Image (tube, coloured by chain):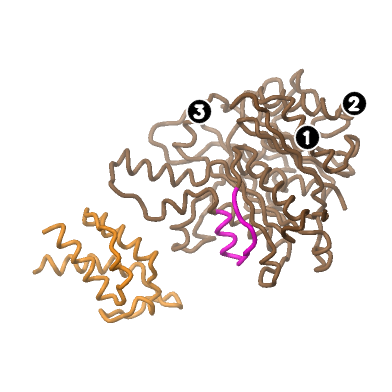
Amino acid sequence: MSNDVSVEDRVKEIVTKYIKADDGSTPELTRETELQTVNLESLDLIEIIFEVEDEFDIDIEQDEKTAELKTLGDVLDWLTGNIEEQTA
Amino acid sequence: MHRVVITGVGSISGLGPNLNESWKTALSGQTAIGQMDIPSIKPLRQKLAAQIHGYKPEDHFDSGDLALIDRFSQFIILSGREAISDSGIDFSTDIAEETAVLTGSGLGGWETINDSAKKVYYDQKPRVHPFTIPKIMPSAGSSHLTMEFGITGPAFTISSACSSSGHAIGEAFEMVRRGRVKAAVTGGGEAPLIYGGIIPWQALRVMSSTACRPFCKDRDGMILGEGAGMLVLEEYEYAKSRGARIYGELCGYGLSSDAGDIVDPSPEGAAKAIRKCLVDAQLNPEDVTYINAHGTGTTANDRTETSAIRQVFGAAADNVWVSSTKSLHGHALGGAGAIELALTVKALETGILPPTVNFTEADEECQLRHVANEPVEAKVKAVLSNSFAFGGLNASLAIKAI
């Protein structure tokens, strides 16, 4: 379990780097935060995937589901799911 | 056919971060060529280049954008911003729909190509940064300018090695004079000063280890540079109607190919481009005050170019001033023509001709009226700028006072 938390924290750290409010400040984040409201765009997601692949030395396949990710929770779950699947 | 005028100019090179500073350095005779300082794996044989020292991308672009923009595109964007601001043209108006953006680049994102190759082959990484492709595209500079300024007319990039930006400016000129667009933002840039970029040039054995001395008896090669130049061209009546400051009229464009050798230039090919340019501009050889030569500092180029100028100008060749500013800003390959045209515009504006520095004694086969070491004041009527590329692709541009 402690391993899972650490994975999620590492992913969170990567994702947070790409988040910015309109005024440039770092907004308060919850799992329910919508990607749109923190300017997290599809290009950011591509960079995040690249960093996660590098960090965990895995390959995340192209997945149409990324278009359906709406909240930070969705992104974290999808990424950690991929990591767990490949590092299990 | 419409008349085409130059209303804005921008440039960045080792000579300076903008055109005015570059011009000041050029007239002082201070060359930008010096010790090259780039990350290397093994020591490079080539030590000299005209590098833009102290350049900080983060001073000009935010970090998110930088992930998407290669160094050569950064230079194109910066000089494009300068040219547009200098011209005062307002792209929040309808003119944005009737403006072209044409750039030249011989290599495109060579730094990014090298970084990616290093990761894949040397570090054996299975992946590279996701924006590698959009950074490499030679047309990226054009695209970024259209996006930054909302310019929606024709936009693309020409790649013809060392004539790339000469051809780009020439084709933008054609678009404006034929009425396809009312204005154009055009020029080009290059960023070849990278470890994996210097080594192939070393292999060609055309670079000098001492200095760039075009047309001199003791010259021993060219020296690479980096940077960009951009111009705003406008249809004359449009420029007048908005009260734009006009530097001069872009009045001639001549081009040809040698159909000869992939590296060895031909005097006939170069002469054909210069001759066609004069005919196009309706200028006689006697009308031309100054030629900004391609003048790389290699034996092959300098003798060929001298012969071409002599063939076209005949007796008038003794009176036309010639210099190669590559002795000052190095050879920026696909960006060279634009950096040089920017300085040539200043020559037309100020009546001061920039020199070939490091000039010792002219080669017997390079006898011309050289602007040697010191700037020359002259009443400037018309000027030419030559670009001759590997593979024999030649472009010559003419500007005259209005």
Magenta-drawn segment: B141-157
Residue located beneath label 1 in the image: B274
* Front-most of residues B12 and B53: B12
Magenta stretch: includes residue B155: yes
Chain shown in orange: A
The reply, left or right, for residue B94 in relation to residue B106 is right
Instruction: Say if mark 1 contacts mark 3, CB within 8 Å.
Output: no
SS state under label 2: helix
Q: Residue at x 82, y 59 (%)?
A: B236
Q: Tell me which amino acid carries mark 2.
A: Ala
Colour assignment, chain B:
brown
Q: Mark 3 packing: few (<14 Cα in 10 Å), some, or many (20+)?
A: some
Q: Residue at x 50, y 49 (%)?
A: B137
Give the chain of mark 1: B
Residue located beneath label 2 in the image: B315
Which dot marks residue B202? 3
Disc 3 to disc 2, C-alpha distance = 39 Å
